[in-house]
Amino acid sequence: MRKSGKVGNEGKLVLVTGVSSGIGNEACKLFKHKGYRVIALSQRPNDRDDIHRCITLDLGSFERIEALSDIIETEIAAANRVVLVNNAGYGQFGALRDLSEEMWLKQFSTHVFGPIKLASVCLRLCEKHAVPMRVIAVSSVLSIVPQRWKGAYGASKSAMNAAHDSFWFDERENQHLESVSIILPGPVATQFRANALAALDPLINAEHTNKRADYDSMAAVLAPGARRKPFTASAWNVASRIFRAAESSRPKPRYYVTPQTYIAVLITRLLPHSLQRLVLR
């Protein structure tokens, strides 16, 4: 049975992962402005005016996510509604043949394993305290179409989509899970490039690779001051879609941001794979 008694946004709680900059940072500001209690979940927690509480989160460990249950439960028990925003992410670029097991595991732990475990913990606590919950995952246009040297990132974001959709189907009869929505942006003006460059650096300097010239070119594209792609969205553009999914009376399974994402959807829906490869190469 769901709680009642509070009106407006009083009692609304949002938990946001990946808040140090960019989309997560803007989402925290927007939800705080709209009257939500904002809980930030971050590898590098710090006190800020736009959040009520910051909790250390390690998406690479189920045990550590589970260990947050008591802290999260305190917040959920006091709420009338919960929104979980699985936003944390980074891009591990590079030819698939060059990626180490550690690189693969970290990429999938950040985008798939950790977010679903966190959603599961939150849902269990929402069931316990009879609080309705929504889950919103921030994915990528590269979960729809592949791109050279970005296979691990695209694969993990595709898996993120599938895992969150499956989470919805698994729990669709659960009265405490209202919706699961996936946000699909194209290029966004954030620290993503800087973080991707840092993740690429071990491959640039690796002795075994035969892609060094390609990695040098990619590093130039990711470097500070490099030209942005056309129709690059702002972090606020994405945050506003997240808030729409949180507040809509009929939230959508997918929210698209930037023309690149709409084009990618059309290509994959209308063209056979043989033509897709010609168009996307």
Image (cartoon, rainbow, N blue to C red):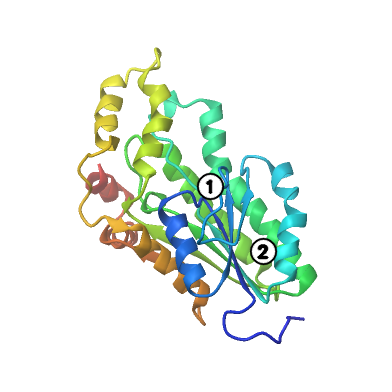
Residue 130 location (% of width, % of height): 75, 75
Which residue shows up at 75% across the image and 63% down it?
A: 74
Residue type (three-letter) at the residue carrying disc 1: His
Query: For this view, does 166 lie left or right of residue 248?
Result: right
In terms of depth relative to the viewer, which is nearer, 85 or 142? 85
Q: Is disc 1 placed on a helix, strand or loop?
A: helix
Could you tell me how many numbered marks the image carries? 2
Residue 123 location (% of width, % of height): 70, 64
Query: For this view, does 185 lie left or right of residue 34?
Result: left
The answer to whether any part of residue 184 appears in the image is yes
Q: Would you call the spot at circle 1 few (<14 residues within 10 Å), some (14-19), or many (20 or more)?
A: many
- Residue labelled with disc 2: 170
In the picture as drawn, the residue positioned furthest to the right comes out as 128
Rendered view: 25 above or below 107: below
Rendered view: 191 above or below 185: above
Residue 187 location (% of width, % of height): 31, 52
Residue 173 location (% of width, % of height): 69, 73
From the image, which quarter does the N terminus lie in?
bottom right
First of labels 1, 2 by sequence position: 1
- Residue labelled with disc 1: 111
In terms of depth relative to the viewer, which is nearer, 24 or 200? 24
Which residue shows up at 36% across the image and 53% down it?
A: 141
Query: For this view, does 17 lie left or right of residue 125?
Result: left
Q: Disc 1 and disc 2: Cα gap in Å? A: 19 Å
Residue type (three-letter) at the residue carrying disc 2: Asp
Rendered view: 153 above or below 201: below
In terms of depth relative to the viewer, which is nearer, 230 or 34? 34
The answer to whether any part of residue 253 appears in the image is no
